[in-house]
């Protein structure tokens, strides 16, 4: 019992300690006034955004952009992933290219999206899509490539057609790792959309963060960032719960 | 056999883990130049015993004497070879062998000289600069043995060193080990679960009981050395194996029952 | 290991892709404001290179990455060792750091701008944070994963704790530690370029931003391509370097 509780205590203690140091630094004249607002001020600003509902239209915009982007990323990522995963030859040629691109900050493509798609939702959706594509594609490639050969042989030996083999053997065994990729992709899409909103935008969570920054409404900025993190955490938790349930079914 | 005072003497060694007795009241003497094997069913604590002698784990009670001196922890007079791969993958064979000497501060020249001698002795000529990833399982164990021997231990402790090797390699390495032992007169205490191996290699075989491990019997193997393939194929060899199997079988069945398994059909 | 044939095919594909774009642009199938041809990008690159602009941008980025990496490595390695040494800390912080790493850290950058001011230091600080986490986690994991047998060997030879640390633990954990350093460096580069783009202070990331705001499509694509090439170069070099450092594998 103790061994489970102790790490938790340390974690809680660390967070509390951090908050206390934050308060102290904020109160002292160490940094320019307002740079490190009190924790309570930040919480108050967050509460304000929630209770007045001012955050919700922007939240909706971001979620909308991220969702559409994720859908696009999921579709293209899974299709490409299956094609490459099932074809070792093509995989060897193209997977390294995908890996190279995965290591590039997607935000660099944003101006291209701005030019082609304009300054409204579409460019952010494109950011979300591009960001979410890579974890999904890469995970799907591995999932498709690692379908147990033995199962395929079993299916073929009982005379299953190609379609049946695909739906009855491939798909079930790929579901879990693909969904694991989706979980990463969801987080990435969300961040991608928000990054797009940080520049040349007029709506969304990223927008209100940068607005607060530009008008030096510091506590508000911290609050918005905090709420955004909370959203990201929620998305992760939900996806993880689904993943855990899927794992349960797999056994 | 008994050449004067024993190199290793253990008296009434017991080991307890949280109320569970692994070994109980084990006493044994090993004399200079002797090859003594310890066999026993799984879980009889033979590896535990070896590690206690090596000083790697503390004993609950009893004493260990090496050359008459009481020994508490690890002692330079004991060298140990493990069953698992224990040579460092980031060092070449030669560097692995020289490791202990390097840690003792022996000069480079001296280290190289002694390590190369060991390379020759353990039949690793030509493989000095290979990394473990380039060596077979058998060669890796040769390196492990060489690493222990280069420190010139009074007592070499071996914990199922050939356990993870295939049968042919095991037999070859067993022969090699005997050759090495004859050449440098090493005293060896050898743990194994393989009865054939025990009879092939040893002067005496100690049979341990199922847990808590005690000494059930000690058998003297009066076969000639070197133990050639004729001797291994001989009737006498078979009789020793049979004797040991009878002694061991009883304990193995007990061991199965303890582990909650159904024993194989009689 | 891949055959030269696979490598060649890949680059042929890339070349075809670039050629298609070149053709599309030359035939004016698309408005010049949207897309520009590889050859024009190359010309712009040459001009920039010539004027020394490109070099100074590149050096700035390199400087930011280097400082962030040095700090992240020192702190990360020490912290990783501490987490291993004091297992309670290890168990507590592994989870915490893992959760932190999975969160959108980049969104914290306005905070760094507020605290460090709108300059290079904010970028270096963010990069350091990004790089530190994988280094700590990997160092800790690497030390934890060391096969117990090696430690038994050291103990059996009566080595001091320092000797075991230096001659057994570290060499054994080295591959994972290197992996962590590699990952950290990659994340540092990504975050530095991203921040340069977002904040417009200087460095490779700003090219694309400038290109957009000055309606200079060539410059924009140069910035994009430049960043991509830099990342690719980076990944390749890191791969080769770590293969060399781990030559025994």
Image (cartoon, grey):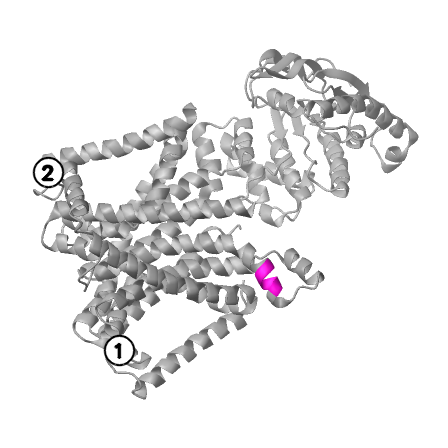
The single residue placed furthest to the front in the displayed view is A52
- Residue at label 1? C34
Q: Position of residue B160 (x, y in %)?
A: 68, 31
Foreground pick, C165 / B178 = C165
Relative vertical location of residue C216 with respect to residue A237 in this rendering, above or below: below
Which region shows up in magenta? A164-168
Foreground pick, C229 / B109 = C229
Q: Is residue C53 magenta?
A: no
Q: Where is residue A240 in the image (x, y as percent from the top left)?
A: 41, 46
Q: Residue C243 carries which label?
A: none
Q: Residue at x 35, y 53 (%)?
A: A187
Dot 2 falls on a residue whose secondary structure is: loop
Which of the 4 image quadrants contains residue A51?
A: top left
Residue A59 shown left or right of residue C15 in the figure: left
Relative vertical location of residue B10 with respect to residue B50 in this rendering, above or below: above
Dot 1 falls on a residue whose secondary structure is: loop
């Amino acid at each position: 019992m103790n061994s489970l509780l102790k790490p938790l205590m340390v974690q809680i203690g660390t967070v509390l300690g951090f908050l206390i140091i934050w308060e102290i630094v904020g109160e002292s004249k160490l940094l320019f006034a307002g740079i490190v607002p009190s924790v309570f001020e930040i919480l108050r600003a967050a509460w304000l955004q929630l209770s007045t509902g001012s955050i919700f239209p922007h939240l909706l915009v971001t979620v909308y952009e991220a969702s559409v982007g994720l859908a696009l990323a999921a579709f293209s990522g899974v299709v490409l992933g299956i094609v490459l995963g099932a074809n070792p030859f093509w995989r060897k040629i193209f997977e390294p290219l995908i890996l190279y691109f995965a290591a590039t900050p997607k935000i660099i493509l944003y101006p291209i999206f701005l030019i082609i798609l304009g300054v409204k939702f579409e460019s952010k959706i494109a950011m979300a899509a591009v960001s979410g594509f890579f974890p999904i594609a890469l995970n799907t490639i591995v999932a498709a490539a690692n379908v147990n050969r033995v199962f395929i042989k079993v299916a073929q030996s009982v005379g299953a057609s190609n379609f049946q083999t695909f739906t009855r053997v491939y798909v079930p065994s790929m579901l879990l790792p693909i969904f694991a990729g989706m979980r990463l992709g969801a987080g990435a899409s969300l961040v991608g959309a928000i990054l797009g909103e940080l520049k040349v935008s007029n709506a969304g969570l990223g927008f209100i963060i940068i607005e607060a920054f530009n008008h030096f409404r510091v506590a508000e900025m911290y609050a918005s960032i905090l709420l955004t993190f909370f959203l990201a955490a929620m998305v992760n938790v939900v996806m993880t719960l689904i993943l855990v349930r899927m794992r349960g079914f797999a056994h | 056999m008994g050449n004067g005072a024993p190199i290793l003497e253990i008296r009434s060694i017991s080991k307890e883990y949280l109320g569970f007795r692994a070994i109980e009241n084990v006493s044994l003497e090993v004399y200079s130049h002797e090859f003594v094997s310890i066999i026993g069913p799984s879980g009889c604590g033979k590896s535990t015993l070896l590690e206690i002698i090596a000083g790697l784990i503390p004993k609950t009670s009893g004493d260990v004497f090496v050359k008459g001196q009481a020994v508490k922890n690890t002692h330079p007079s004991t060298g140990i070879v493990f069953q698992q791969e224990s040579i460092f993958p980031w060092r070449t064979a030669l560097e692995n062998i020289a490791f202990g000497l390097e840690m003792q501060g022996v000069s480079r020249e001296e280290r190289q000289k002694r390590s190369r001698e060991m390379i020759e002795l353990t039949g690793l000529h030509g493989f000095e600069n290979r990394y473990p990833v380039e060596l077979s399982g058998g060669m890796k164990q040769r390196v492990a043995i060489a690493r222990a021997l280069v420190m010139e231990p009074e007592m070499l402790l071996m914990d199922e060193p050939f356990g993870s090797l295939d049968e042919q390699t095991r037999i070859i390495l067993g022969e090699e080990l005997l050759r090495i032992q004859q050449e440098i007169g090493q005293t060896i205490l050898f743990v194994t679960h393989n009865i054939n191996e025990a009879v092939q290699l040893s002067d005496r075989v100690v049979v341990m009981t199922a847990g808590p491990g005690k000494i059930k019997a000690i058998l003297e193997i009066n076969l000639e050395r070197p133990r050639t393939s004729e001797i291994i194929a001989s009737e006498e060899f078979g009789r020793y194996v049979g004797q040991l199997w009878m002694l061991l079988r009883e304990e193995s069945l007990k061991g199965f029952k303890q582990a909650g398994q159904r024993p194989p059909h009689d | 290991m891949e055959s030269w044939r696979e490598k060649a095919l890949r680059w042929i594909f890339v070349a075809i892709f670039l050629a298609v774009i070149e053709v599309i642009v030359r035939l004016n199938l698309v408005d010049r404001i949207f897309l520009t041809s590889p050859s024009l990008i190359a010309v712009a690159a040459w001009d920039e290179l010539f004027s020394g602009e490109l070099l100074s941008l590149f050096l700035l980025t390199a400087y930011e990455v280097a400082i962030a990496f040095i700090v992240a490595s020192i702190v990360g390695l020490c912290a990783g060792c501490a987490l291993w040494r004091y297992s309670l800390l290890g168990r507590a912080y592994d989870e915490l750091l893992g959760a932190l790493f999975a969160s959108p850290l980049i969104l914290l950058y306005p905070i760094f701008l507020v605290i460090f001011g709108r300059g290079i230091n904010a970028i270096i600080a963010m990069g350091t944070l990004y790089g530190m986490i994988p280094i700590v986690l990997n160092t800790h994991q690497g030390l934890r994963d060391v096969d117990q047998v090696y430690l038994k060997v050291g103990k059996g030879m009566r080595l001091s704790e320092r000797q075991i640390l230096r001659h057994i633990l570290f060499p054994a954990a080295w591959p994972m530690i290197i992996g962590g350093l590699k990952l950290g460096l990659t994340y540092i580069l990504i975050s530095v370029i991203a921040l340069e783009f977002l904040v417009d202070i200087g460095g490779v990331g700003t090219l694309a931003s400038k290109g957009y705001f000055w309606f200079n499509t060539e410059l924009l694509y140069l910035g994009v391509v430049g960043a991509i090439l830099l990342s690719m170069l980076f990944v390749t070099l890191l791969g080769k370097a770590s293969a060399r450092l781990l030559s025994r594998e």
